Image (cartoon, rainbow, N blue to C red):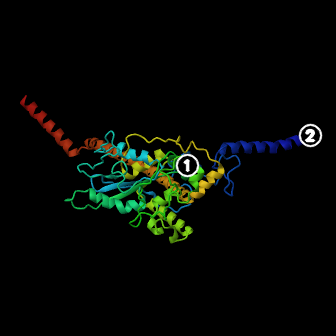
């Protein structure tokens, strides 16, 4: 009786073992190809069915890999300028304080591979960046044309000033050329930028000579009161720096990229604070989107890559990421950091927008590079096939000789041999 029961139990056990062995053979561990009827992966699959594996480097992946908070179109992401340095095109650098603009500005005049490099002489702050064959500058920046539109001129000032300045620099007897102006800028994390500006002012720096021109005039003292009464603000504490309501460090990036004419320039009584903030932010985003190029201080190599792809100009040496800045050495508590974020609420939103746009443009450029590489390899394979086919064709022609021609040759040989025999 016991023997019979053991035999009956042995059959299902062996069946289960057989099924398990077969399953392991067909669906090895880690495979995502075996799924249940509802589409779910088996428990031991490394990745769930609804999760796509991601590349370690997001910039190397396709440009539309993750859902966007902003509805960027392909036209927003594609940036390529047929920059005619020998023609009438001009790059205009909008230099926002404490965004790494000084370093980037030096790259523009000293580190670009050009047919006619900028002439930078020792002891001089400005370089001469003339076009090949012309005594005319292709770059409008601090280190090429100087502060021709005012110290750290913003978007409102530059767009109203640059064309007139460039025409004035042109020879009087030369006809006025129609120029293409390509605006570029750098942005930085708002908290880091704010702390850097505070440290800079604390050391005695001022921008008192800045014009802040808008609608043809500078702001009145009532519209833009000074934060300090002495010569400078040396030794200012962070609390004092944050306490000044007219401190232009607050939301500086948004203000310098927006069209201030839309909000009555520096006249804060022209509309409500909420409406003013809304118009400033939307204008800054719109202008940033339309710029030929912008970079981010926190991503130097990607900034270099995007500039080179946009303008077709190449830097001689690679950019260096320097994280050990003065702002990085400042430690602030959570309440202070939140206060800085509140004072720079518009810049926080603008930077979030800029960072995603920047990341997607870099991804899009990498995507284009891969497509171009695939197309290059495809064309190369096609040319190799054509060359191989052209080499094989003459051999086939030799092998497929005309039979009549061969018979003629044989007949000629026979006749010649017969004549020789008769003569012998």
Residue 407, disc: none
**Left or right of 336: which side holds 87?**
left
Residue 275 seen in the current view: yes
- Which one is in front, 159 or 401? 159
- Which one is in front, 284 or 23? 284
Number of numbered discs overlaid on the protein picture: 2
What's the residue at 37%, 63% (across, down)?
160
Within-10-Å neighbours for mark 1: few <14, some 14–19, many 20+: some
- Which one is in front, 133 or 194? 194
| Quarter of the view holding residue 412 | top left
> Dot 1 lies on which element?
loop
Residue at the outermost bottom position: 271
- Which one is in front, 320 or 340? 340
Within-10-Å neighbours for mark 2: few <14, some 14–19, many 20+: few
Nearer mark to the viewer, of 2 and 1? 1
Expressed as whole percent of the image width and height from the top left, the position of residue 299 reads: 49, 47
**Left or right of 183: which side holds 335?**
right
State how far apart marks 2 and 1 are (Cα).
95 Å
> Dot 2 lies on which element?
helix
Report the residue marked by disc 1.
Answer: 236
**Residue 76 versus residue 55 in the image, above or below:** below
Report the residue marked by disc 2.
Answer: 2
**Residue 286 versus residue 323 in the image, above or below:** below
Badge 2 or badge 1: first in the primary sequence: 2
Residue at the outermost front position: 230
What's the residue at 42%, 46% (across, down)?
102
């Amino acid at each position: 009786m016991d023997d019979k029961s053991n035999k009956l139990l042995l059959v299902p056990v062996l069946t289960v073992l057989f099924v398990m062995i077969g399953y392991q053979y067909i669906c090895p561990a880690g495979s995502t190809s075996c799924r249940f009827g509802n589409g779910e992966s088996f428990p031991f699959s490394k990745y769930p069915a609804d999760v796509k594996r991601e590349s370690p480097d997001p910039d190397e992946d396709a440009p539309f890999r993750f859902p966007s908070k902003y509805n960027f179109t392909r036209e927003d992401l594609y940036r390529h300028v047929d920059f005619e340095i020998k023609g009438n095109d001009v790059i205009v650098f909008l230099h926002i304080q404490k965004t790494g603009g000084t370093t980037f500005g030096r790259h523009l005049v000293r580190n670009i591979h050009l047919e006619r490099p900028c002439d930078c002489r020792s002891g001089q702050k400005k370089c001469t960046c003339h076009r090949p064959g012309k005594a005319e500058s292709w770059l409008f920046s601090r280190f090429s044309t100087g502060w021709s539109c005012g110290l750290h001129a913003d978007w409102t000032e530059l767009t109203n000033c640059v064309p007139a300045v460039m025409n004035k620099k042109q020879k009087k007897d030369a006809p006025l050329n129609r120029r293409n102006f390509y605006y570029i800028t750098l942005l930085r994390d708002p908290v880091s930028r704010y702390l850097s500006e505070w440290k800079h002012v604390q050391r005695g720096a001022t921008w008192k000579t800045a014009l802040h021109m808008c609608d043809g005039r500078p702001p009145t003292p009532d519209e833009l009161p000074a934060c300090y009464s002495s010569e400078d603000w040396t030794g200012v504490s962070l609390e004092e720096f944050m306490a000044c309501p007219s401190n232009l460090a607050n939301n500086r990036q948004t203000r310098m990229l927006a069209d201030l004419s839309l909000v009555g320039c520096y006249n804060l009584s022209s509309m409500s604070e909420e409406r003013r903030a809304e118009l400033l932010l939307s204008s800054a985003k719109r202008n940033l989107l339309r710029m030929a190029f912008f970079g981010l201080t926190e991503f130097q190599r990607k900034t270099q890559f995007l500039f080179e792809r946009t303008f077709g100009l190449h830097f001689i040496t690679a950019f260096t990421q320097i994280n050990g800045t003065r702002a990085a050495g400042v430690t602030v508590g959570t309440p202070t950091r939140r206060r800085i974020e509140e004072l720079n609420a518009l810049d926080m939103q603008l930077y979030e927008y800029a960072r995603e746009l920047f990341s997607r443009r870099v991804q899009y450029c990498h995507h284009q590079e891969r497509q171009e590489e695939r197309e290059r390899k495809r064309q190369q394979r096609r040319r190799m096939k054509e060359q191989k086919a052209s080499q094989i064709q003459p051999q086939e022609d030799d092998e497929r000789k005309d039979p009549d021609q061969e018979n003629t040759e044989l007949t000629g040989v026979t006749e010649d041999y017969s004549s020789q025999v008769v003569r012998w």
